[in-house]
Image (spheres, grey):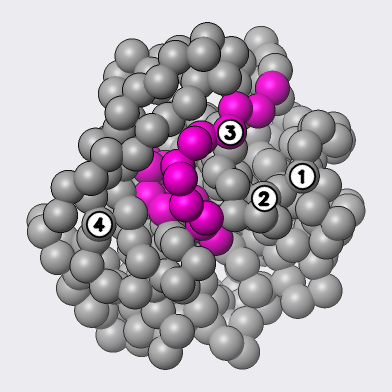
Amino acid sequence: MLLYICLSLIYTAVIAELPCTVMPGILTQLDAGNREVYGVNADGNIYHWVQKDWVQIPGALTHVTVGPAGVWGVNKQNYIYKIQDNDWVQVSGLLKQIDAGGEKFIGGVNSGDAIYCVNQDGTTSRGTDLPWIQIDGALKYYSCGPLGCWGVNSANQIYYRYSVSPTACQGSQWKQVDGSLVMIEVGSDGSVYGVNADGNVYKREGICPKNPTGTSWTQLDLCSSFKHVSYDAGYLYLLTMKGRIIKCAIPESIAASLL
């Protein structure tokens, strides 16, 4: 089913209609990266979007992620898994949320909101005893991309981590960014989207290598409330409060103007 959702570009007062599709299924979380999409439902079932439908893959997870570092996930016991040789392999550590969007490094947070990451050399090895590095601070959600990492804490405050690299995933220091979000995701192109406590979706404007924290937030006028957002390769993926999946195409002209 095809529908149109209005995207309001506040700073130009331009209204553009986005072509959006209601995808089949109900999910509690999804992630898009490297032109792939994975998701999990309330029963812990894992799905991979293949061509025009969801394909269930073996295993049970509460959170899944896909990106340059591969496909990773955590289950309800906070055990961590990665896909290796087309199968899930358990690795060391405990996390409640994990992100594979960095340049072949991973990051995540545990049940106590402690933040951890593994450098590229750790994620690309075939070992299961990963060299986790703890990062100072406390976050409930953490996501990385080519221009750095973003996160939100238990008070819904937003932070950006400077000097993150594949060989120094711990970075150097935090900068608090204006706004309030319950979750945040960094796209593979460096774009940043998030959802606030009221279910509103926001896009960070002005992000570039010289100003990786951007300039301001633009609310997307999506005429509904959402609990999760992810972006990759020109498509915005959204989960409604009931878990319905919405996929919206972002025109290149709009995507470029928002970066």
Give how far across and how far down residue 165 sits, in percent.
Answer: 63, 35
Span of residues in magenta: 216-238
Structural crowding at the residue carrying mark 2, measured as other residues with C-alpha within 10 Å and reported as few (<14), some (14–19) or many (≥20): some
Residue 196 numbered mark, or none: 2
Find the distance from the CA under tag 2 to the CA under tag 4: 22 Å
Q: Amino acid at mark 4?
A: Val
Q: Which callout, 3 or 2, points at the residue further toward the start of the chain? A: 2
Find the distance from the CA under tag 2 to the CA under tag 1: 6 Å
Residue 22 numbered mark, or none: 4
Q: How many marks?
A: 4
Give how far across and how far down residue 135 sits, in percent.
Answer: 81, 53
Residue 180 numbered mark, or none: 1
Find the distance from the CA under tag 3 to the CA under tag 4: 21 Å
Residue 217 lies in the magenta-colored region = yes
Q: Does any portion of residue 165 appear in the rendered image? A: no
Q: Does any portion of residue 203 appear in the rendered image? A: yes
Find the distance from the CA under tag 3 to the CA under tag 2: 10 Å
Find the distance from the CA under tag 1 to the CA under tag 3: 12 Å
Seen from the viewer's position, the closer of residues 229 and 76 is 229
Q: Is residue 253 left or right of residue 196?
A: left
